[in-house]
Each structure stands twice: as structure tokens, then as C-alpha cells.
Image (cartoon, rainbow, N blue to C red):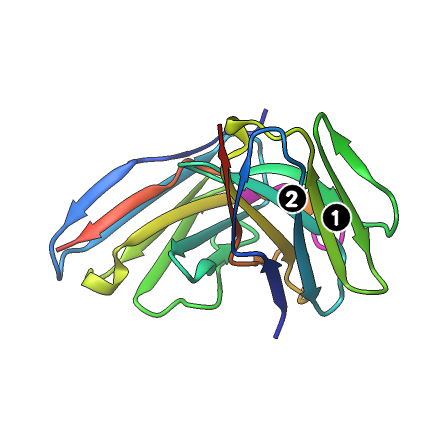
């Protein structure tokens, strides 16, 4: 079974703090993704990575950065947290590479619910 | 821009009813359509559909894809309270396999005892 874990289930931070969200997958997947999920807006892609040290912007990258130093770990960084970044953050991974449907299925971690005060 | 639209956005039925959830899509270089079930936590994978007209089945859940009309349906028969969840439909972005998924906003299904 694919296992994707996230470092925290719930997190409370203050405006302006630097926030690190960690995600680890244990299935040697090539691709990893960060989404945020908000009521009425659904899941939106923030960043993704298809290889170590590689990263690509998703639909809403502003205010975020990512780091992928090891294949199994993908970190989302909020450089200076703001209240509009209060959300549920979901990490996912997929086997990769491009164009093979079975390898594009994404498996999700349990989510981190972040509250920025 | 890729688009996935689900309907209805919410649905309340009684235990034992059959429900049909809808998903339409407009995706460049379409490859597959995915269904997920989300309870209070992470979305869990249900089905991946790539071919038209071939039903995928798992217990009381089934799903089918129509690539000509660009939609998919998810059926749940003999619903139980444990089926209450948000059901998400998604498709890989058109740019290539390493891209993310475009999600619909989900159908919030509530099964009343």
C-alpha cells in the first residue's frame, strides 16, 4: 500500500511566521504534489515536483515555495504566513512518468489543517 | 484551461437509495479520469477510467466514462451511512503526466438513516 505521511495534522501559526509542511512517501514515487483545499474552491495545485531538486509551479504558487532534496520528501514552505493561507494542505504522490495513466494516479496524505492567526 | 465540473454539489438521500454523481470535463490531451472519496481527511482513490463504455465496479460503487460526451458518472447502490462523504472527480492536467490533477469542486453526499 502506498503511504504518504504529513508531519502535522493541525498547525496554528501567527502572521509573518515561516511555516514548513513536510510530506514523505514510501513508495519510491517520482512525482509529488502540494494542494490546498478550501470550501467552495475545491483542491488547487500549489507546486509539484517530478524529480529530486526539480519543482514546477502549479495554479496558485504565490506566497509558497517548495524543496525536494530527497526523492521521498517534499516540503512546502510559507515564507511569511498570512491569514489567507489558512487552509487544509494536502500532499500527494504518483509513480510517474508522463503519459501512462496507471502511473498518474495520485495518492494523498492525511492533510495538514493550518490556521494562521 | 482544463476544467472539471461536478453535479450536484450536494445531495441528501436516505439509506438504501441509489445515487448517481456526475462529472463533466474539458481537458487538453485527456488521458484518464479519477474518482476519489473524501471523508474527514485525505481523498482516497476509488477508480481510474481511461476507456469509454467500460464499467469499473467495486462492491456497490461503479463508474463509467463517455469520452465522446466528455463525462463520467459514479453510481452507488443500496447506500449506507458510511457512504456519506465528498466525492471528487479529477483529471491529469493536459501538459504531461507529471503535472497535477484538475479537480471538480466535489459532490457532498449525505446519507440519512
Q: Main secondary structure of the magenta part?
A: loop
Q: CA distance from mark 2 to mark 1?
A: 7 Å
Q: Chain of mark 2?
A: A
How crowded pointer 2 is (Cα within 10 Å; few <14, some 14-19, many 20+) is rated as: many
Q: Which mark is residue A105?
A: 2
In this view, the residue in front, B9 or A32, is B9
How crowded pointer 1 is (Cα within 10 Å; few <14, some 14-19, many 20+) is rated as: some
Residue at 13% over, 62% down: A16
User: Is A1 situated left or right of A113 in this image?
Assistant: right
Residue at 25% over, 39% down: A10
Residue at 61% over, 51% down: B89
Residue A86: x %, y % from top left: 25, 56
Residue B20: x %, y % from top left: 68, 46
Residue B47 appears in which quarter of the rendering? top right
A45 over A31 or under it: above or below: below
Residue A33: x %, y % from top left: 49, 51
B74 over B1 or under it: above or below: above
What stretch of residues is rendered in magenta?
Answer: A93-101
**Circle 2/circle 1 CB separation < 8 Å:** yes
Residue A11: x %, y % from top left: 21, 42
A62 over A73 or under it: above or below: below
The N terminus of chain B lies in quadrant: bottom right
Q: Which residue is mark 1?
A: A101
Amino acid at each position: 500500500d502506498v503511504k504518504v505521511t504529513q508531519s502535522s495534522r493541525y498547525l496554528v501559526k501567527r502572521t509573518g511566521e515561516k511555516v514548513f509542511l513536510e510530506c514523505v512517501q514510501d513508495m519510491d514515487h517520482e512525482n509529488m504534489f502540494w494542494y490546498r483545499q478550501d470550501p467552495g474552491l475545491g483542491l488547487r495545485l500549489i507546486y509539484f515536483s517530478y524529480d529530486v531538486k526539480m519543482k514546477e509551479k502549479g495554479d496558485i504558487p504565490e506566497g509558497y515555495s517548495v524543496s525536494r532534496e530527497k526523492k521521498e520528501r517534499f516540503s512546502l514552505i510559507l515564507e511569511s504566513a498570512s491569514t489567507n493561507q489558512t487552509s487544509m494542505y494536502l500532499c500527494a504522490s504518483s509513480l510517474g512518468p508522463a503519459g501512462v495513466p496507471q502511473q498518474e494516479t495520485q495518492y494523498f496524505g492525511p492533510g495538514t489543517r493550518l490556521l494562521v492567526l | 484551461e482544463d476544467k472539471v465540473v461536478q453535479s450536484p454539489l450536494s445531495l441528501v438521500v436516505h439509506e438504501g437509495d441509489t445515487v448517481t454523481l456526475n462529472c463533466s470535463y474539458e481537458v487538453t490531451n485527456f488521458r484518464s479520469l479519477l474518482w476519489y472519496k473524501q471523508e474527514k481527511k485525505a481523498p482516497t482513490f476509488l477508480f481510474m477510467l481511461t476507456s469509454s463504455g467500460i464499467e469499473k465496479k467495486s462492491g456497490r460503487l461503479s463508474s463509467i466514462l463517455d469520452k465522446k460526451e466528455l463525462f463520467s458518472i459514479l453510481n452507488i447502490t443500496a447506500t449506507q451511512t458510511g457512504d456519506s462523504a465528498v466525492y471528487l472527480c479529477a483529471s491529469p492536467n493536459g501538459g504531461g503526466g507529471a503535472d497535477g490533477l484538475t479537480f471538480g469542486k466535489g459532490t457532498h453526499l449525505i446519507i440519512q438513516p
